[in-house]
Image (tube, rainbow, N blue to C red):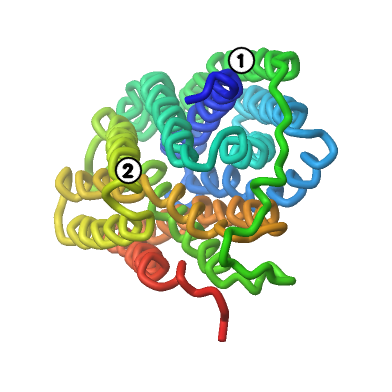
Amino acid sequence: MSRSYIYPMFIIGTLFFVFGFLTWINGILIPYFQICLELSNFQSTWVAFSSYVAYFVMAIPSAKILKHTGYRKGMFFGLLVMALGTMLFIPAAYSRTYELFLFGLFITGSGLALLQTAANPYVAIIGPIESHAQRIGFMGLANKIAGLLSLAIFGSVFLFNADEVIAQITAVPEYEKNQILDAYALKIVLPYIIVTIVLLVLSVMIYFSGLPEVNEERAHTAYEGETVKNKIVNYPYLVLGVLALFCAGACEVIPIDGIILYSKSLGISLNESRYFAQYTLYAMIAGYIASTVLIPKFLSQNKALMSSALWGIFFTISAYFTEGVISVGCVVLLGFCASVFWGTIWGLSLRGLGKFTKLGSAMLLMSVVGGGIFPMIFGGLMDINEHRPQNAILLLIPCFTFILFYALRGYKIKNWS
């Protein structure tokens, strides 16, 4: 790695660490809010929706903001917006108001969308194209390692003795139950004060970092042999890639954000299941390491995508036909399958877009909303099928199937006719 961009990549790696820390905490917040706010599975998965819908709303506005601010100032403003969102958790906890929590998650997600809109293309254009996959791999590892720390730290705080809290509130009068839940909700205050302070400190560090602006022109040049078209919708492989990444949101988020709810529905205690989201992230990290080693030296991007989709279908069917910890273990292994989706679909979708590269990136970022929509459907299906929660996991079959189609054919389609 050239020394000329080691420093910028360290800064961007720090931001990807922040992405992971605040994105994957949803796997803990969902069961935590379900307890302290007395929510159904469907209601609790609004946590994921509020976080990911911000990407859909803010992706294109973020691209326009970056045109005026540049990358460094855009990252600075993104961190400030995130700090505002995390700060809203404090009054939300004291009032035990779910709507305010969700609004805080949306504001935090909006800041993340601005940061991601800046950081993802920056990774691509800060160094040579030949080492882009390597740089993305490093960023992915930073993201997932942060997620592991987030789940470990917050899981030990928010879900510690959660089973005991559930047992207490079912055996006491209403006013005592409210007192117990009010105290339980306040567990979130000190951690989120610390998170807010860290974000503010990082924003100042980014502002004075001297992070260089880069020339985007080389990232917006059509590849040799590609015909530049006059409308972005005339690139079928991009449009299909957006849909594939939308489906990938289900395959990546449900095994992390939904696994504790799924385990609870299968009769596994929270004191045990609070670790399962971490196991899924371990599987994802293993997948990232494997993809860094195998792609492209031993495996092309589309073949890696095809193989992962096939294994995803296999483990989904296995989770459906098994019970208890074995079924949960199959869901954990879905994390390994989903680990390659983001990088491979992104790379196959953006090739040769020329002047439409930035807009194509924004469209792909908008598709992340799938990570918010599918967990809500998953939660609703578990509520409906409470005696057979495995039925809900079948939601992933059409998602993996569409990704398989994209890997086999969709990425090749250059014209609609």
Q: Gap between marks 2 and 1, in whole Å?
A: 32 Å
Q: Position of residue 252 (x, y in %)?
A: 40, 48
| Count of numbered labels shown in the rendering | 2
Q: Is residue 387 left or right of residue 123?
A: left
Asked whether 374 or 12 is in front, the reply is 12
Asked whether 170 or 388 is in front, the reply is 388
Q: For numbered disc 1, what is the local secondary structure?
A: helix
Q: Can you identify the residue that label 1 sits on?
A: 198
Q: Amino acid at mark 2?
A: Ser
Q: Residue furthest right?
A: 68
| x 49%, y 27%: residue | 21
Could you tell me if the residues under marks 2 and 1 are in contact, i.e. CB atoms within 8 Å? no
Asked whether 143 or 304 is in front, the reply is 304
Q: For numbered disc 2, what is the local secondary structure?
A: helix
Q: Position of residue 126 (x, y in %)?
A: 61, 33
Give the foreground label among 2 and 1.
2
Query: Is tag 2's residue or tag 1's residue first in the polypeptide sequence?
Result: 1
Q: Residues within 10 Å of mark 2 (few under 14, many from 20)?
A: many
| x 64%, y 74%: residue | 234
Q: Is residue 22 left or right of residue 338?
A: right
Q: Relative to 272, is 45 above or below?
A: below
Q: Amino acid at mark 1?
A: Val
Q: Quadrant of residue 215?
A: top right
Q: Residues within 10 Å of mark 1 (few under 14, many from 20)?
A: some
Q: Position of residue 306 (x, y in %)?
A: 31, 61
Q: Residue furthest front?
A: 224
The answer to whether one can see residue 265 in this image is no
Q: Can you identify the residue that label 2 sits on?
A: 291
| x 74%, y 14%: residue | 208
